[in-house]
Amino acid sequence: MSPPDKLSLIIQSGEFNRVHYGLVMASAALATGKDVTLFFTMDGTRAITPGFADGPQDKMLAQKDLATFEELLTACAEMDATFMVCEMGMRATAVGRGQLRTDIKITEGSAVSFLADASANGAILYI
């Protein structure tokens, strides 16, 4: 069995540790030459708003010399991850386009868009 050629992550959780580890997986896949799409939906949409990582958890990671949320997000953007936000998830959580981060390129999409972007030889993870 060959390894997946692409990693597609559904970030549905708005819980910091889950989103952070999703970024760990995404950056590791990118570093090994795999394409990555991160699909933020429902409470996960809040993870791509400014200030999401401004809290004690990210400070604790920095104190332990571990990659912070911002470092991982920046690394994913620099390694050309695709960031997609679910239109339905934005409506469900009342997160508007104007509330999203502007320092990374984020495209709007749907479940259909996400599945069309996924690879037949890839892996899909749900977080």
Image (cartoon, rainbow, N blue to C red):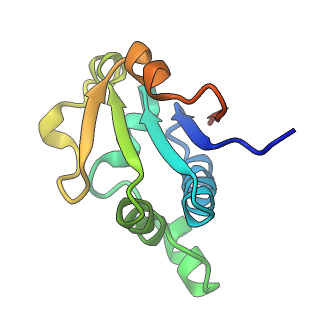
> Who's the residue at 52% across and 28% down the image?
118
Of residue 4 and residue 70, the one placed in the foreground of this image is 4
> Who's the residue at 66% across and 31% down the image?
121
Q: Is residue 38 left or right of residue 121?
A: left
Q: Is residue 94 above or below residue 56?
A: above
Indicate the quadrant where residue 76 lies: bottom left
The image position of residue 59, as x and y in percent, is 50, 76
Q: Is residue 120 above or below residue 97?
A: above
The image position of residue 67, as x and y in percent, is 56, 75
> Who's the residue at 56% across and 30% down the image?
119
Q: Is residue 84 left or right of residue 115?
A: left
Indicate the quadrant where residue 89 lies: top left
Of residue 2 and residue 91, the one placed in the foreground of this image is 2
Image quadrant in which the C terminus is located: top right
Image quadrant in which the N terminus is located: top right
- In the rendered image, the residue lying farthest to the right is 1
- In the rendered image, the residue lying farthest to the left is 98
